[in-house]
Image (tube, rainbow, N blue to C red):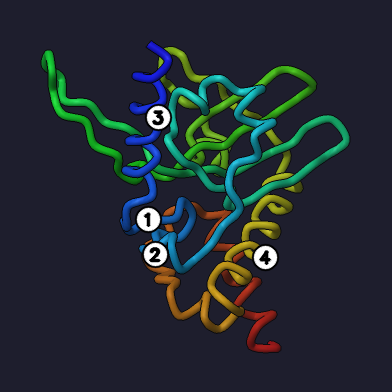
Amino acid sequence: MLMGAVVVLSSMEALAQSPQLMSDPLFGILYDPQKVHFDKIPPLLVDKCPALRERYVAAWVYGHLKTADTDYFLISGLMEFREDKPGGSRTIAPEEGDGVAVALRDSKCLVDQADYFLTQDINPAKHATPITAPEAVLNGILADAFRKYVAAFGGKQDFLKHVKPDAIATPIVRKQLEIFYKEVSGR
């Protein structure tokens, strides 16, 4: 039995490492994770948030902010999809949508869709765990996200070459992008 689990995990790991384009959760940028590197999700977060372990085969952190009582994360990654029939095929593919937001407070883990977190709208899903946060927290996690994107893409200008402002739906992300443009251009 243990040998079977090792084989399954090894094959899933190999599938997760096969070349695939990822779409980031904030700007919709398609990128090759073999060339553009974001931090992997911390093991502690996976340990404290079983929903993440069940959701992702591999995942990356696109933004993080630690406050006095909460760690906030913006996460997206590769998921396993299974065909809805007995013996159906499975595939590993990038998450569709905008990833998730995670709030870790003490031992309590809240996970919600990132777009609901960034707009502070209430997710109407039956088992949703909305994450409420003040605008300062949203701005802080986005400031960290911009730092991570600049590092991942090799500089401010290289990052901006990939951004398509018209593709950004979330108002606070658009606002922070405008501020970032002004800082980069010196205006």
Query: Percent position (x, y) of residue 125?
Result: 41, 19
Mark closer to the observer (4, 2): 2
* Residue at image coords 57%, 67%: 152
Give the residue type at disc 1. Met
Disc 3 from disc 2: Cα separation: 25 Å
Depth check, front residue: 43 or 49: 43
Q: Is residue 96 above or below residue 85?
A: below
Give the residue type at disc 4. Arg
Q: Sequence order check: which comes first, mark 1 or mark 2?
A: 1
Residue placed under numbered mark 2 in the picture = 31
Q: Are marks 1 and 2 in contact (CB under 8 Å)?
A: yes
Mark closer to the observer (4, 3): 3
The C terminus sits in image quarter: bottom right
Q: Sequence order check: which comes first, mark 4 or mark 3?
A: 3
Q: Are marks 3 and 2 in contact (CB under 8 Å)?
A: no
Disc 4 from disc 1: Cα separation: 19 Å
* Residue at image coords 44%, 33%: 56
Residue placed under numbered mark 1 in the picture = 22
Give the residue type at disc 3. Leu
Mark 1: secondary structure = strand
Mark closer to the observer (3, 2): 3
Q: Is residue 56 above or below residue 63?
A: above
Q: Are marks 4 and 1 in contact (CB under 8 Å)?
A: no
Residue placed under numbered mark 3 in the picture = 9
Q: Residues within 10 Å of mark 3 (few under 14, many from 20)?
A: few
* Residue at image coords 69%, 80%: 183
Mark 2: secondary structure = strand
Query: Percent position (x, y) of residue 26?
Result: 49, 55
